[in-house]
Image: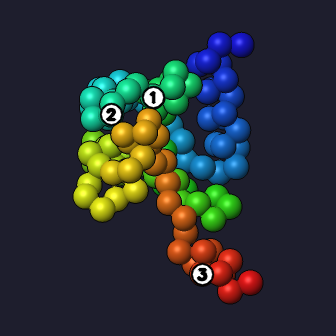
């Protein structure tokens, strides 16, 4: 099974759970995103981002960034704004893909 086949299977799986994910040519958006990074993203993630559009979604206490436009949070985080987590992650080869949901972290702190 190719990388694209695995990505397609993943997209079908999350679509089956009601996530509005759509096939779309995002190669120019991916190029913009990667131009801001010190290294290219892994092939599977590049395949996913270059071929699908999806909203932000919350799963298990994490709010994953959406990939819907050139103003995507991925592109903002790739610019490593001062004081952001990305400012520390990017130089070490990591990309932020989401953030913790505040209400969940508050509940975990209380338990």
Circle 2 sits in a helix, a strand or a loop, which is it? loop
Residues under numbered marks 2 and 1 in contact, where contact means CB atoms less than 8 Å apart = yes
Circle 3 sits in a helix, a strand or a loop, which is it? helix
Q: CA distance from mark 2 to mark 1?
A: 8 Å
Q: Could you say where residue 67 lies in the image, as x and y percent from the top left?
A: 42, 44
Q: CA distance from mark 3 to mark 1?
A: 32 Å
| Residue for point 60% across, 74% down | 105
- Answer above or below: position of 17 versus 110: above
Q: Which residue is mark 2?
A: 37
- Sooner in the amino-acid sequence: mark 2 or mark 3: 2
Q: Which residue is mark 3?
A: 106
Q: Could you say where residue 46 lies in the image, as x and y percent from the top left?
A: 47, 26
Instruction: Quarter of the image for the N terminus: give it.
Output: top right
Q: Which residue is mark 1?
A: 41
Q: Could you say where residue 83 lies in the image, as x and y percent from the top left?
A: 30, 62
Is residue 42 shown left or right of residue 3?
left
Q: CA distance from mark 2 to mark 3?
A: 32 Å
């Amino acid at each position: 099974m190719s990388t694209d086949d695995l990505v397609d299977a993943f997209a079908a799986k999350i679509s089956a759970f009601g996530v509005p994910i759509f096939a779309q040519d995002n190669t120019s958006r991916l190029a913009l995103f990667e131009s801001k990074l010190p290294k290219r993203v892994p092939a599977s993630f590049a395949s996913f981002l270059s071929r699908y559009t999806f909203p932000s979604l919350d799963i298990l206490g994490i709010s994953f960034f959406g990939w819907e436009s050139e103003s995507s949070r991925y592109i903002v985080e790739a610019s490593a704004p001062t004081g952001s987590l990305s400012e520390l992650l990017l130089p070490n080869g990591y990309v932020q893909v989401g953030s913790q949901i505040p209400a969940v972290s508050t509940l975990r702190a209380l338990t």
